[in-house]
Image (cartoon, rainbow, N blue to C red):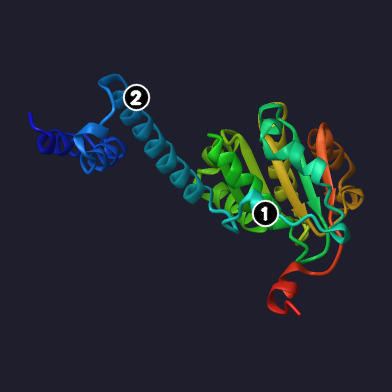
Amino acid sequence: MNNQATLERMRQLKLLGMAGAFEALLQLPVHQHPPTDQLLAQLLDAEYEQRHHQKTKTAIRSARFRYQASLEEVHFLPARNLSQDQWLRLSDCSFIKRAENAFFTGAAGCGKSFLASALGCQACRSGYRVCYCHLPRLLEKLHVAKADASYSRELARLEKQHLLILDDWGLQPLDQQAKLALLQIMEDRHGKGSTIITSQLPVAQWYDYIGEPTLADAILDRLLHQAHRFELKGDSMRRKTLNPN
């Protein structure tokens, strides 16, 4: 089998990373070709990187993040009250392995959702399953699921996520069914998965937001245990982007 036939066979087998590396190698003079053992290692590395890249792209697309954000884009301005040391403790995603939670609170536009998205994208790159949810829409979806018998299936999907991001906690009042749904989600994930919450409400007001003492105690007990808290301050980042001067 000649080189072109080998290249075509790689493509037929969908070894696209390997095919790309082999095709690039064929463009080099023969005296620059590596020994057989190095060639094999290079081709395998290229295939691994290609598959990892594709898997990460699929995971990020499936998570449906609000922003396509990266850790490198985060700004540590003193006025934001964002500690770089505290952020770095999360950026390696080891908090997910420990099933710890993280809360980003602050005024509208201060970057809560962006930070949550950046951590979520990094978690996807690290091989974790991640789901990003706008909380009001999620609760509405669960309400509808009650009627079409898909409620348990949807809860099971959320339970399987290594990291669940709930955006806009506290944006609208909770009825009894929503409170019970939140309790079930937190119970399913407690000690097994991490949850990131973004909210305009300070954590101190979450108890009153839930409103019912028994359910508030049960939900917050599962959330607040081993949680990282970021209380962001400063002007709207969105206004700064629109008016840089």
- In the picture as drawn, the residue positioned furthest to the left comes out as 1
Amino acid type of disc 1? Leu
Residue drawn at point x = 43 percent, y = 37 percent: 52
Where disc 2 sits, the SS reads helix
- 89 left or right, relative to 37: right
* Residue that numbered label 1 is attached to: 135
Residue drawn at point x = 87 percent, y = 38 percent: 217
Where disc 1 sits, the SS reads helix
Q: Earlier in the sequence, mark 2 or mark 1?
A: 2
Q: Residues within 10 Å of mark 2 (few under 14, many from 20)?
A: few
Residue 168 x, y percent position in the rendering: 72, 57
Q: Residues within 10 Å of mark 1 (few under 14, many from 20)?
A: many
Looking at the rendered structure, which numbered label has been put on residue 41? 2
Which quarter of the figure has residue 85? top right
Which quarter of the figure has residue 75? bottom right
Q: Is residue 123 above or below residue 65?
A: above
Residue 201 x, y percent position in the rendering: 85, 57
Q: Is residue 18 above or below residue 77?
A: above
Amino acid type of disc 2? Ala
- 29 left or right, relative to 216: left
